[in-house]
Image: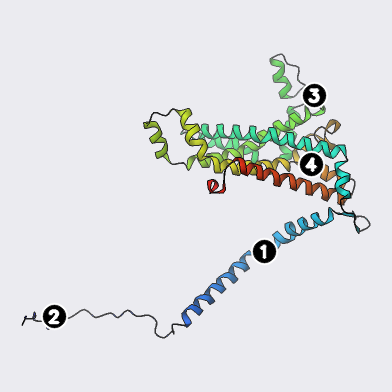
Amino acid sequence: MPSHPAVDTTRPHAPIVHRSTDSSVPHRERPQRRRKFGRERRRVALLLLAPSLVHLVWWIGLPVVATFALAFTDYDILAGTVTFNGLDNFQEIFSDPTWNASIWHTVVFTFFTVPVAMVIAVVLALLLNVKMRGAAWYRTAVFLPHVTATVAIALVWMWMFEPRLGVVNTMLGWIGIDGPVWLADPDWALTAVIVVSIWKGIGIKMLIYLAALQAMPNDVYEAARIDGASQVRQFFSITLPLLKPATFFVLVVSIIDSFQAFDQLYVLTPDGGPGNSTTVMTYEIYRTAFKEFNMGAACAQSVVLFAFLLVLMLISRRLTGKEDDVR
C-alpha cells in the first residue's frame, strides 16, 4: 500500500476561509432588491431631469404643437378669437410675392454662407493644427467673433461698409475700384450680409474641425508617408474621409443657423433692406406676426420653414453618408 506523507502537527495551519453568499437573504429576495434599487435610481434620474423636461415641454414642446395647430386657423390675437380656416393661410402666404422672395433670399443666403464658411474653416483648422508659436492666440482670434455679440459685430461692419469713409470702400479705392453703397444698394445688400455672416460663423466651424483633426490617429499618416503619399494625397484620401462625421455635424448646424438668421440682418438692413432685398423667411415671419398681427399666417410660414429645414436635413444626410459613418 502506498505510504502517505506524515502531517506536521506542530506547525500552525492557515485558517480555512469559507466563501459563501449571504445566507441570511433568501435567493428569491435578491432579484427583488436589485429591482427596487433600479427603481430608486430611475426615480432619482427623473427627479434630476425634471427641471430640463419641464423647460423642454413648456417652452419648446407646447409652442411647436401650438404653431402647427394655429397654422390652420384665423387667430385674432387682439380679440382673442380662433377660427378654423383650413389651408387658407398657406394659400395666402404663397400668393404673397414678399414671402416668395424671402424664400429665395434665404436659399441664396444659405447656399453662399454655409459652403464658403466650411471650406475656410477647414483650411484654417489645417493651418492651426501645426505646432507653432502663439497657436493658441491665433485660434482664439479666429474663434472670438463667434462669442461676440451679433449686434456689436453688425454695428462695426456698418461702419466698415460706409460708402465714403468705410474701410471696405477705402481699400477698394486703393486698387482703383469705386465701391458701391453696400447696405443701401439692392444689388449688394444681401452680399454684404453674407460676408458678415461668413466671417462670424467661421470660428465655431474651425474649432469643430480642429478637434476632429487632433483626434485622428497618427499611425495612418505614418503608413501613408512610408508608402510615399504626398500631402495632397493624404488630405484627400485620409483627412477628408475621416472628417466626414464632423462635416455632417457642421453642415447640419450651419444650415439651421443660416435659415434662422435674423439679428445681423435686422441690424444691418432694417425693414428687410432696400427693396426687400434682404428679407429672409425669419424676418418675414417676424413682420407678419408682430407688425401685422396675423398670427395664423405667421404660424403657417413657420411650418413652411420647418419643412424646408427637414428636407435639407434629409438631403445633407444623404450627401454625407450613412448613419454608421457618423458614429
The disc, 2 or 1, on the residue closer to the chain's N-terminal end is 2
The residue that mark 2 highlights is 11
Identify the secondary structure beneath mark 4: helix
Image position, residue 298 (x, y; %)? 84, 48
The residue that mark 4 highlights is 281
Q: Are marks 2 and 4 in contact (CB under 8 Å)?
A: no
The disc, 1 or 3, on the residue closer to the chain's N-terminal end is 1
Q: Are marks 2 and 1 in contact (CB under 8 Å)?
A: no
Image position, residue 66 (x, y; %)? 80, 57
The kind of residue on which mark 4 rests is Met
The kind of residue on which mark 1 rests is Pro
What is the residue that sits farthest to the right in this orientation? 79
> Around disc 1, counting alpha carbons within 10 Å, would you say few (fewer than 14), some (14 to 19), or many (20 or more)?
few
Q: Are marks 3 and 4 in contact (CB under 8 Å)?
A: no
**Closer to us: 52 or 62:** 62
The disc, 1 or 4, on the residue closer to the chain's N-terminal end is 1
The disc, 2 or 4, on the residue closer to the chain's N-terminal end is 2
Identify the secondary structure beneath mark 3: loop
The disc, 3 or 4, on the residue closer to the chain's N-terminal end is 3
The kind of residue on which mark 3 rests is Val
Identify the secondary structure beneath mark 1: helix
The residue that mark 1 highlights is 51
> Around disc 3, counting alpha carbons within 10 Å, would you say few (fewer than 14), some (14 to 19), or many (20 or more)?
some
Of badges 2 and 4, nearer the viewer stands 4
The residue that mark 3 highlights is 181
**Closer to us: 66 or 292:** 66
